[in-house]
Amino acid sequence: NAGVTQTPKFRVLKTGQSMTLLCAQDMNHEYMYWYRQDPGMGLRLIHYSVGEGTTAKGEVPDGYNVSRLKKQNFLLGLESAAPSQTSVYFCASRRQGWSTDTQYFGPGTRLTVL
Amino acid sequence: DAKTTQPPSMDCAEGRAANLPCNHSTISGNEYVYWYRQIHSQGPQYIIHGLKNNETNEMASLIITEDRKSSTLILPHATLRDTAVYYCIVRGTSYGKLTFGQGTILTVHP
């Protein structure tokens, strides 16, 4: 049971390039999330998904797109990277339910946009 | 979402109890208090959560005041590996969004 995994761990992009970050979970969780964390800050929600085939915007969605074609995977795309998107990206997942709201986080992807 | 207020930093001696406070004076009646921690830029790790009653698990204890306007996370015997940023979070909307503030940097020293 690997939990939540993220690919890649590190990436350097030039301004204007595109890339996709992959998040995978093997816990059969319905909900999945993408957060970003800038230096010295807490995490901010980018997009989330409450089930296969559904996605929704979080606090800071601009410049990102997501897809949830399979229940276990949640993809985060940057179509045209900008230096302001330099950050650490965390994926998380959790089961449905009100009181059992534990989110499990991946190890993060460190992205630098030059 | 209810806003939380935490001290920016705290120190604790190894082996002693670490008591981390959190104020959440605008919490609603059906909102839970969650604690997560983040060790050295790793992904955040769930610690404990509660609604009204005090809670204890293998990692920590959570004490919530009777009026629910504040809470305290207690690490009973802190170790060097407990050095981390601790986030107090009040559970928000139905999709489970977690609103992270800046947290408390806990430093455990020998």
Image (cartoon, coloured by chain):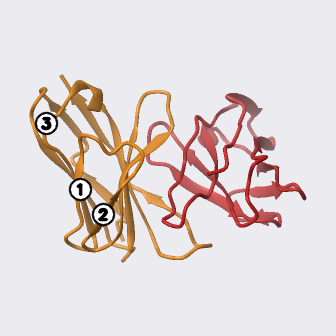
Chain colours: A orange, B red
Task: State which quarter of the image contains the C terminus of chain A.
Answer: top left
Q: Are marks 3 and 1 on the same chain?
A: yes
Q: Earlier in the sequence, mark 3 or mark 1?
A: 1
Badge 3 density bin: few <14, some 14–19, many ≥20, Cα 10 Å:
some
Residue corresponding to mark 2: A55
Question: Farthest residue in the left direction?
Answer: A17
Q: In 3D space, how far apart are the residues under numbered discs 1 and 2 (Cα atoms)?
A: 7 Å
Residue A12 left/right relative to B70: left
The picture places residue B60, in percent across and down from the top left corner, at: 72, 56
- 3D distance between C-alphas at marks 3 and 1: 14 Å
Q: Chain of mark 1?
A: A
Query: In the figure, A38 relative to A55: above or below?
Result: above
Determine contact: label 3, label 1, CB under 8 Å: no
Asked if residue B48 lies left or right of residue A97, the reply is right
- Which callout, 3 or 2, points at the residue further toward the start of the chain? 2
Residue designated by label 3? A80
The amino acid type of the residue labelled 1 equals: Val
Residue name at image x 48 percent, y 65 percent: B95
Residue A101 picture location, percent across and down: 56, 67
Task: Give the chain of mark 3.
Answer: A
Label 3 residue SS = loop
Q: Residue at x 17, y 31 (%)?
A: A12
Marks 1 and 2, the one that precedes in the sequence: 2
The chain containing the residue under callout 2 comes to A
Residue holding disc 1: A66
The part of the image, by quadrant, that contains residue B82 is top right
- The reply to whether callout 1 and callout 2 are in contact (CB within 8 Å) is yes
> Where residue A100 is drawn, which disc sits there?
none
Residue extending farthest to the top is A114
Helix or strand or loop: what does disc 2 sit on?
Answer: strand
